[in-house]
Image: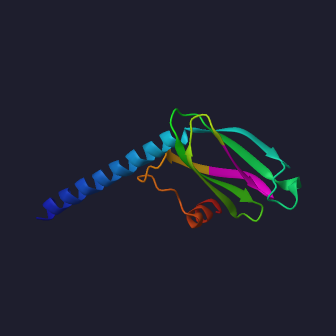
Amino acid sequence: MKAFKLIILSVIATLFCLDINAQQDKETIETACLMKTTSEWASDCGQCLNDDNTYRINLQNICEKAIDVRLAVQENTLRWKIFNFTEIPAGEEVSGYACIGTGRYVFWTRDANDPSVIFPSDREIELQFNR
């Protein structure tokens, strides 16, 4: 009976790992849809009091399909300014900024309106990337 339980647990663990790997592979493929086109310091922001230390990142959807994007740009306080974009058509650009930036940014993508890929929360981003 113990051997049977071990076999069942092994099968469940294997299936779980395969599902995680498949999800990671899908996320890697989706992330490949977004490419940095330009970044600039001291860009005119309109949202910032002083543009001298503003960091702006521009990313383009290089896939043939629409995607959703979650972009985080780091402020010098080490907090992240979060931007969400939905249904970005092929070839279109998205942009994010930090008023007093560090030059660091991270992003996630998925097929447009794909509920199977869940973006990290603001808190998860703060915890994972402020180590």
Task: Tell me which corner region of the image, top left, top right, bottom left or bottom right, holds residue 123.
Answer: bottom right
Residue nearer the viewer, 131 or 52: 52
Residue in the image at 78% along x and 61% along y: 76
Is 95 within the magenta? yes
Q: Which residue is drawn at 34% across and 50% down?
A: 19
The location of residue 99, given as percent across then percent down, is: 80, 58
Judge whether residue 65 is colored magenta: no
Q: Give percent across and percent down for residue 83.
A: 64, 56
Residue furthest left in the image: 1
Q: Residue at x 19, y 58 (%)?
A: 8
Magenta stretch, overall SS: strand
What residue is rendered at 44% in x and 49% in y? Answer: 114
- Image quarter hosting the N terminus: bottom left
How many numbered discs sit on the rendered protein?
0
Task: Give the left or right position of residue 114, taking residue 124 as reference.
Answer: left
Give the extent of the magenta segment. 94-106
Judge by depth and name the residue closer to the eye, 30 or 28.
30
Residue 61 coordinates in the image, percent (x, y): 59, 38
Left-right relation of 21 to 39? left
**Residue 39, image x, y percentages:** 76, 43
Seen in the picture, residue 47 relative to 22 is either above or below; the reply is below
Viewer-side residue, 64 vs 20: 64
Q: In this view, does 83 lie to the left or right of 29?
A: right
Q: Which colour scheme is used?
A: rainbow
Quadrant into which the C terminus falls? bottom right
Q: Is residue 51 above or below residue 111?
A: below
> For this rendering, which residue is in front, 6 or 64?
64
* 85 up-or-down from 78: above or below: above
